Every structure is written in structure tokens, then in C-alpha cells.
Amino acid sequence: MGNHHNHDHSHHHLVEGKNLLFSIVLNLVITTAQVIGGLISGSLAILSDALHNFSDVLSLVFSYVAHKLAKKKASVNQTFGYKRAELIAAFVNAMTLIIVAFFLIYGAIERFINPQVIKSGLVIWLSILGIIFNGLSVLLLKNDADKNLNMKSAYLHLFTDMLASVAVLIGGLLMKYYQWFWVDSVLTLIIALYLILVGFDLLKKSTQILMLFTPDHIDINNIIAEVHKIPGVEKLHHIHVWHLNEDELHLEAHLDCTENIKLSDFNSILLKIKTVLFDKFQINHINIQPEYKREEASKDFIVQD
């Protein structure tokens, strides 16, 4: 017999998809301009930035579709609905950040070995255009980026694009006034390394949730210590704590009771457990299986069922 309890105070963040849609349009415009300008100027930094922007367009579209899917209601075949769609989008977007970074590194090394003259004036104007468009997209998604990993992945794509445009502007000015044409490759390498860093961080976080790992801020021993303080509790074991998505933190466990109590008495204990778990650990979905002197192969705190 299991008892499932949802805490009524779980936080459901309202994330707007319209800002994401507008960012897609902005990125299509800047990508087109950068491809044309990069081919005319011969700038690797602009062409690589255009490649990154194009990957952003695909990533933003993927994020938008996932955002819409996540709102679909549960059914008999999808009992959790599509709540994890945005996590999958975050994972894929993190992978694309890293893949694009390695393409940029390859191109930068190739251009460094075989440098070419670049029309720095066009580079400067296109980078300014990139800063304006990407900066606007970053502002549009900034609030949503704090609410879930999907929006954060989209935001990071746009934020790194903005940084890339700033770097290209600096490089363009140095090329124009000092003829430092090698700066183009160096700045591309710096941008690529930054993409790898933020990409791996996002990949790690999305993987942890998809693999049902215990969240970093949760200490199972602390949960046990707090629950064991509640009268009527003998032992909490077979504990699993995981994120379904950014809003839902789940716990399931077996609970040995000190006495052979009625279900109504267990409900009273469960209410106390629920309150402690939410107030101290922000766990808002609880599934507890009550037991009394049940013989099991293991009653360890962590058991891989």
C-alpha cells in the first residue's frame, strides 16, 4: 500500500514562449546578414559567429517546440505528460554548444596557419549589428532563463553569441588600426573555449536530472535525520529523491512504523513528514509506502530496486 502526496505549495513558474519566438526571428535576420558579410569580408570570426547563430536558430526552434510540448496534459499513455521535453531540449542544446565549439577551434587553427586579409570595416559594422540583435534577445529571455534549463540553454546560446559579437568588434578595431589579422583566430578560440565551459555545465545539469540523480542540494542523511524525529516513525528506507522537472522534486520511500497503526493515524504521520520535507528540502511530491515489521531482503537507506 502506498500513499502519494502532492504539496499544494509547489512553485510552477510561468514561462512565456512568445519571447523565444521573437528571438528566433531576430537570429534569422542576424544569421543571414553575417553569412553575407562574412563571405564578403573573409572574416572567420563572422562566419563562425554565423554558424553559431544558425545553430542557435535550430536550438531555439527545438526549445520552443519542447516548451509547447511540456504544457500538454498527461494521458493514459503519458502519465507524466511531456514535462521532461524541456530537459531533453536543454541536453541537446548543450551538446550543440560543445559541437559548434570544436568546429570553431578547427577553423581558427586552420585560419591561423593560413592567414587571410580581412575587410575589417565590414567586420566592425556586422559585429555592432550582432551585439544589438543578440543583446535584445538576451534581454527578452533573461527572466525565463532563471526558471528552467530549457530556457537557460536558449539564453546561453544567445548570450555567447552576444559575447562573440563583442569579441569580433574588438578584433575588427585591432585589425583596422593595427593590422593584427591574427586576432581573428585568437578571439575565435577564446569564444570556442567559453562555449565548451558553459556547454559542459549545462550538459552536466540536464544529465543529472534525466538520470534521476539526487539533486546536489539534497543530503539523504539529513532527510533521514529529520524524518526520524517524527513520533511514530521507526525507519525510513528505500529512499529515492529526484527532479521530474525544475518545478517538481519527488521523493519515494518505505516507512517502518513503530506500531501497527490505522491508516488514518498513518495519514497524520504522513502530513508531518510532508511538511518537514517541503519546508526543509523543497520536496513537493511524496510517495511513502507504510510498513510494520515487514520482512525484506534489505532495509538499507539506499536500495536499487
Image (cartoon, rainbow, N blue to C red):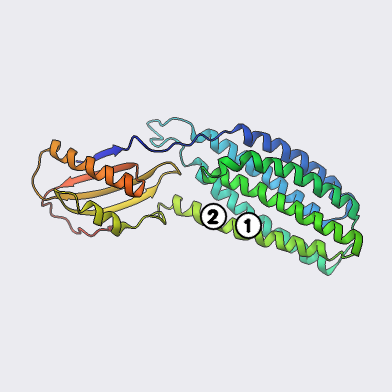
Disc on res. 98: 1
Image location (x, y in percent) of residue 45: 79, 56
Horizontal side of residue 267 vs 240, given as left or right? left
Q: Residue at x 59, y 49 (%)?
A: 93
Task: Name the residue nearer the viewer: 54 or 123.
Answer: 123
Left or right: residue 268 compared with residue 11:
left
User: Which x, y percent locates residue 124?
Assistant: 85, 51
What amino acid type should be assigned to the residue bearing mark 2? Leu
Q: Secondary structure at mark 2?
A: helix
State if disc 2 and disc 1 touch (CB < 8 Å).
Answer: yes
The residue at the point 60 percent across, 57 percent down is 198
In the rendered image, the residue lying farthest to the front is: 279
Q: At label 1, which amino acid type do we have?
A: Ile
Res 143 → quadrant: top right
Q: Which residue is mark 2?
A: 203
Q: Quadrant of the N terminus?
A: top left
* Residue 53 appearing in the image: yes
Real-space Cα distance between discs 1 and 2?
Answer: 9 Å
Look at the image and tell me in which quarter the C terminus lies: bottom left
Instruction: Please give left or right for residue 25 compared with residue 177 in the image.
Output: left
